[in-house]
Image (cartoon, grey):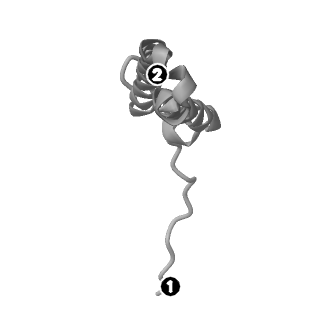
Amino acid sequence: MENTAAHRQPKKTDNNANQTHYYVTLTVAIIIGLFGVFVRFVPDVISALDQYTFLFSMIANVSVIIATLIAFKVVFGILGFGSKK
């Protein structure tokens, strides 16, 4: 008696996580967040900009918030939340 397995087609999955655009968008979000972190400390390094501490803090906070929102949107898109299928 011959032991053979029946040939079958590979499974089709709708694996959403392997799409490149998710990781490009996450990389952009990380770069925006790092920009915000570094901008926050510019007045500490360049003492001539001490009078603009509030401005640099606001720019840093806004960029970190934008990066966070982009990152959450991408992660939830990968997980499948919010997709209208």
Residue beneath the point at 49% across and 30% down: 33
Please name whichever residue, 58 or 84, is drawn nearer the observer in this view of the structure.
58
Amino acid residing under circle 1: Glu
Q: Residues within 10 Å of mark 1 (few under 14, many from 20)?
A: few
The image shows residue 4, relative to residue 71, as above or below, that is below
Q: Which residue is mark 1?
A: 2
> In the depicted view, which residue is nearer to us: 1 or 56?
56
Instruction: Name the element at disc 1.
Output: loop
In the rendered view, would you say 54 is above or below 71?
A: above
Name the amino acid, label 2.
Ala
Residue depicted at 62% across the width and 35% down the height: 24
For the residues marked 1 and 2, what is the alpha-carbon distance in whole angstroms? Answer: 69 Å
**Residue 60: assigned label:** 2
Residue 48 shows up from this direction: yes
Tell me the quarter of the image containing the C terminus.
top left
Instruction: Specify whether residue 14 is in view.
Output: no
Give how far across and how far down residue 78 sits, in percent: 45, 32
The spot of residue 10 in percent (x, y) is: 56, 53
Q: Nearer the viewer, residue 60 or 67?
A: 60
Please state which of the two labelled residues, at mark 1 or mark 2, is closer to the viewer: 2
Furthest residue in direction left, as rendered: 81
Element type where label 2 sits in the image: helix
| Res 61 → quadrant | top left
Query: In the drawing, what numbered circle is on residue 22?
Result: none
Residue 36 locus on image (x, y percent): 49, 27
Which residue sits at x=62%, y=32%? 21
